[in-house]
Image (tube, rainbow, N blue to C red):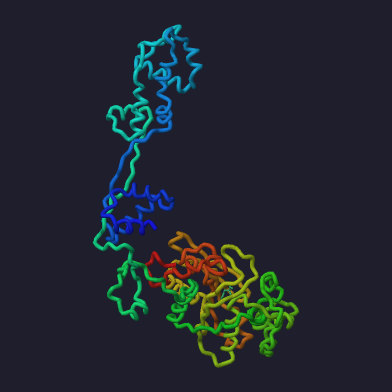
Amino acid sequence: IAEEAVLGYLQNHPEIPDSQLFADQLAADGKINHDDIANAIKSLTGHKYVDSQEITTEKWLLTEEGKTYAANGSPEMRLFMAIPQEGITKEELQKKFDASVFKIACAQAAKNKWVDFGKQLVTRKIQRVDDDRVQTLLLRIQNEKDISQDDIKALTKRKLIVLQVKKGFSVRRGPTYAPKRKKIATDLTRDMLQRGNVDEEDFKPPNLNANGAPTEGGCLHPLLKVRKQLKDIFLQMGFEEMPTNRYVESSFWNFDALFQPQQHPARDSHDTFFLKVPSTTKELPEDYVERVKRIHESGGYQSRGYGYDWKREEANKNLLRTHTTAISSRMLYLLAQKPFSPKKYFSIDRVFRNEAVDRTHLAEFHQIEGLICDRGLTLGDLIGVLEDFFSRLGMSNLKFKPAYNPYTEPSMEIFGYHKGFGKYVEIGNSGMFRPEMLLPMGLPEDVSVIAWGLSLERPTMIRYGIDNIRDLFGHKVDLALIKKNPICRIGLESDEEKL
Ligand code: PHE
């Protein structure tokens, strides 16, 4: 309505001399204030409907104190009038005034030399005061009459008047003036084309700096990006990927085939998720099961075994695999069924452990596993392969620490020097598979298997600077973060940026 008011007024009048006054008139019907009018004028000026000039008006207004003096006279005048011809004691005089007014009145009256403040009496110094100058000046201002600069200074100093500054506009018709603003089209419509008057339309100029609509698309999770890099490294090193597409495994392949005794704590339901349905596996290679049973119970191949009663029911139990080494044992068994040929295998897939969840542990994670199966391999080969593998991940200073796994001997924990952290961090586990595992499978006696495993989550967290695993995986992950993550170029980036 403000806009219509301005344009409408200019239809019959050459100019709005002062938008302030214009707004005041309109405000009579209470709908528009000057802010609305001013905004309308600015916008109309921008679109050349009107030409406008900013004008500021200044006006002196009485303060609350000034208003009471204008109405009742100045305090000094009232004091003067309250003093009788014969004088009055200060106490008596004071009773007639408010404390604050009395103070001002005394000061001003003394300054004007109207009053004598004697020891006993307050008396008039002059006979009469004809004009209450302060009141007169204030009344002039109230009536919008001019007063001298000195008087203004004096009244301002006494805080009886303040200057009001108002910004307004003077407005005339502009080059594209119309009594109503034309709607600016943002899009070419079917309607316009049908009416055939496209040329008459006003189009909004395109904003070439506007952001386009965000493109929506799938994106890779950081774990997948790192997995791809690791997969490439394995492939470059000549490894074949093992088929890991089975989360459910039997205890046999997950533990027994790996010479892990049935009383081992990892086989407890506190550490492993066992399946309720189906709770047991359907079939196992019977002759091999027999050999595994024997090696656990009484040994063989120069081993003493564990010397306990091996139970088939325990081996039959289904579980969610606790490591991808379960797949390695299957693959090695299959390999042993054919005439021997050396193999390099790897896998990267999910494993499950019944663990308390904290900032570095989830009940499921991904394991990276590599193994080489060949005649005459030694611990030196393992160390060499690990150094090659990890240097491709950007870690060239490895250290090894003796460790224990039921299925490897010797076993080594792998530590890598992390430049960013400035210290050695544990990065994996490794070893040479025991003869108690390999020989019952049927592999030739001079064949050794070197193997190692590590988690995918750890290098991913280091690479992407994520310090809580729940920010990487699971329902608390911020999808925006997943979308924005950069690609991963492990081993291809400059040294500082490596893992
Ligand atoms: N399976 C081991 C683990 O879960 C990793 C490993 C694989 C260790 C191969 C040695 C050899 O930690």
Asked if residue 393 lies left or right of residue 113, the reply is right
**In which of the image's four quarters is ligand 1 placed?**
bottom right
Which residue is at the front of the view, 204 or 167?
167
Asked if residue 149 lies left or right of residue 399, the reply is left
Tally of marks: 0
Q: Residue furthest bottom?
A: 339
Evaluate whether residue 299 shows in this view: yes
Q: Residue furthest left?
A: 175
Which residue is at the front of the view, 105 or 130?
130
Q: Residue at x 66, y 89 (%)?
A: 285
Quarter holding residue 118: top left
Quarter holding residue 122: top left
**Where is residue 268 shown, x and y percent of the image?**
70, 72
> Which quarter of the rendering shows the C terminus?
bottom left
**Where is residue 431 shown, x and y percent of the image?**
55, 74
Which residue is at the front of the view, 401 or 17?
17
Q: Residue at x 53, y 72 (%)?
A: 454
**Where is residue 239 shown, x and y percent of the image?**
47, 82
Evaluate whether residue 376 shows in this view: no
Q: Residue at x 26, y 51 (%)?
A: 53
Q: Residue furthest front?
A: 12
> Which quarter of the rendering shows the N terminus?
bottom left
Q: Is residue 236 above or below residue 268?
A: below
Asked if residue 73 lies left or right of residue 325, the reply is left
Q: Residue at x 49, y 73 (%)?
A: 221
**Where is residue 147 shown, x and y percent of the image?**
29, 30
Quarter holding residue 121: top left
